[in-house]
Image (tube, rainbow, N blue to C red):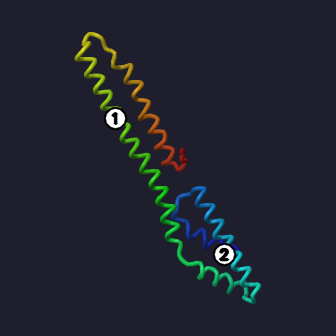
Amino acid sequence: MSRIKSYVDKLFKDIPNSEQKENIKQEIIQNLEDKVLNLMENGKEEEDAINKAIIDFGDIEEIKEELIGKHVNKKSKAGLVLGFSIWGSILIIALVVFMNFYYTPNVIWFIYPTFVVLWWPLSMFFVWLSRKNNKVIK
């Protein structure tokens, strides 16, 4: 039955590692092994039963697209949020700097709100970096 496991591993080699991927792989392996055992009980040789089970299994392109799509969407969403937070922070800081120099040019106070605003892109950078490294945070 190690041939079934290697076959399923080969099918899923292009998909990034995740808990969902491992669960689906285990379910497919279990189903194929059950089918092989059933075929062997009906008189097939083990090698023939394995070949028939693999041929009857068919294509998993839809499963692969779903798994890859979910992984890509999470990564791209994190990148989009990071970009939005950077541009939003730049605009807010620019507004605060303008207000500081327009209304109170003798006192420099824009530095204090700038530190507060910079926490937003910094936290989004952490989320983006963790998703990039496949340590997905929900």
**In the rendered image, the vertical position of residue 33 relative to residue 16, given as above or below:** below
- Judged from the image, the secondary structure of the residue bearing numbered disc 2 is helix
Residue where numbered disc 1 is placed: 88
Q: Is residue 100 left or right of residue 114?
A: left
Dot 1 and dot 2 residues touching (CB under 8 Å)? no
> Disc 2 residue type?
Leu
| Label total for image | 2
Separation of residues labelled 1 and 2 (CA atoms): 52 Å
Residue where numbered disc 2 is placed: 32
The answer to which quarter of the image holds residue 84 is top left
**In the rendered image, the vertical position of residue 86 relative to residue 93, given as above or below:** below
> Disc 1 residue type?
Gly
Residue at image x 39%, y 28%? 117
Give the mark, 1 or 2, whose residue is nearer the N terminus: 2
**In the rendered image, the vertical position of residue 104 relative to residue 90, given as above or below:** above
Residue 30, horizontal then vertical, whole percent: 69, 70
Residue 37, horizontal then vertical, whole percent: 74, 79
Residue at image x 32%, y 27%? 93
Front residue of 99 and 52: 99
